[in-house]
Amino acid sequence: MKKNNLLVSVIVPVYNVENYLEKCLDSIVKQVYQNFEVILINDGSEDISGNICDRYASKYEYIRVFHQENKGVISARNVGVNNAKGKYIAFVDSDDWVEETFLSVLVETIEKNRADIVITGIWRNINGQDTKMFNNIEAGVYEGDCRIPFYEKMLHYEGFRELGIMPYLWNKIFKRDMLANYFCVDLDSDIVEAEDQLIVYPYMLHADKIVVTKDCLYHYEWRESSVTNKRNFNYFENISKVFLCLNRRFQETKYYDIMLPQLKAHMRMLAFFENPGAFAGAFPEAYVAAQREVFPFEKIPKDSRIILYGAGFVGKIYNEQLNISKYCEVVAWVDKAYYEEKYKWLGVVSLEAAKKQEYDFVVIAIINKKTEELVKNSLIENGVPAEKIVAYRRD
């Protein structure tokens, strides 16, 4: 095999993809660019995916296989990054496939521009329908002060569901040293959706030069059976972990003021637009509010005991979110009009009754600013410490 100068490590996490894995691996071994290694991480597959990995590794000397018990895609990718030998790293999901120029274009672009990351478009296949998808941020080279407007739009662009830069790992090429040193450690392996974002966006905040292209060389195959689309996990607990992780990582940079408003808008999108039906059952108005109201996860530590003040529009949404996510415990739900029949059946009580409970915070779920201030002052007058009061989030 003729070798190019720069080794690229292609990392492929594998889990129960026996029907798609061969197509994925065949597309990788047919790459025009020839100096690459493939790292397969069999994450406890229960089908014959592990055997397929072993077969390809025995046939191609540049393929290595790591078998582990099922620990999730974050753990699997970390194994790959920790064992990678290349100057650059690319990712491929094991039920997708790439065109034969995938690596050659990525390597040529990152080398020619001396960049830290190259970001491309993708092909998305849903039910046999292929569609090209591009990043909302224009193709170009971003360095120096040009990165500021890039950062201002990369997570939340303009519309409710618009991302400036697609969050996926697999339509990009990264420098291995940057990836290994900064972004593939201390991640919660229990996060099973939106996990790519925990690496992609913090990485870009540390990049000196970013290149965005309109090349579409990666084929993303959307499947009903995928882990994400089945969503047989606690979705809202998952995204609360995503929020807390990104919030922490953004705080470690000098761009926190730029990223925090985007992060909050992004979390609203993840929490509701991606799964609005979860909030549309008991309270139909929650569906209408699906694009706006998110419990202030970043202000309340997990497993805290809270008194929720307000049983109206926002209060019902917050209460439903917490019932589903189990993020923290509502020890009492309070409203000034607790005695009305429409609130009695919800279990709403008076503030006097609520104060008999042990609690860590009082969360005010009231949109009107003047009413909120009145409630806050009343709480303080009734002996609630100001530092325990968390107001309605306004972004």
Image (tube, rainbow, N blue to C red):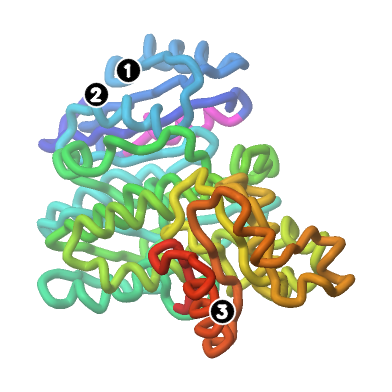
| Mark 3 residue element | helix
Residue 344 percent across, percent down from the top left: 84, 65
The span picked out in magenta is 20-31
First in sequence: mark 3 vs mark 1: 1
Q: Quadrant of the C terminus?
A: bottom left
Q: Badge 3: few (under 14), some or many (20 or more) residues near its Cα, within 10 Å?
A: some
Q: Which is more foreground, mark 3 or mark 1?
A: 3
Circles 2 and 1, Cβ within 8 Å, touching? The answer is yes
Where is mark 1, residue-wise?
64
Residue 279 left/right relative to 46: right
Left or right, 67 with respect to 115, comes to right
User: In the picture provided, is 78 more to the left or to the right than 300?
Assistant: left
* Location of residue 121 by image quarter: bottom left
Q: CA distance from mark 3 to mark 1?
A: 62 Å
Q: Quadrant of residue 153?
A: bottom left
Q: Residues within 10 Å of mark 2 (few under 14, many from 20)?
A: some
Residue placed under numbered mark 2 in the picture: 83
Task: Tell me the amino acid under the disc marked 2.
Answer: Asn
**Can residue 51 be seen?**
yes
Residue 355 shown left or right of residue 84 in the figure: right
Give whichever of 313, 309 is nearer the camera: 309
Residue 5: mark = none
Q: Amino acid at mark 3?
A: Val
Magenta highlight on residue 188: no
- Do tag 3 and tag 1 residues touch (Cβ < 8 Å)? no
Which of the two residues, 78 or 346, is positioned nearer the viewer here? 346
Q: Secondary structure at mark 1?
A: strand
Amino acid type at circle 1 is: Arg
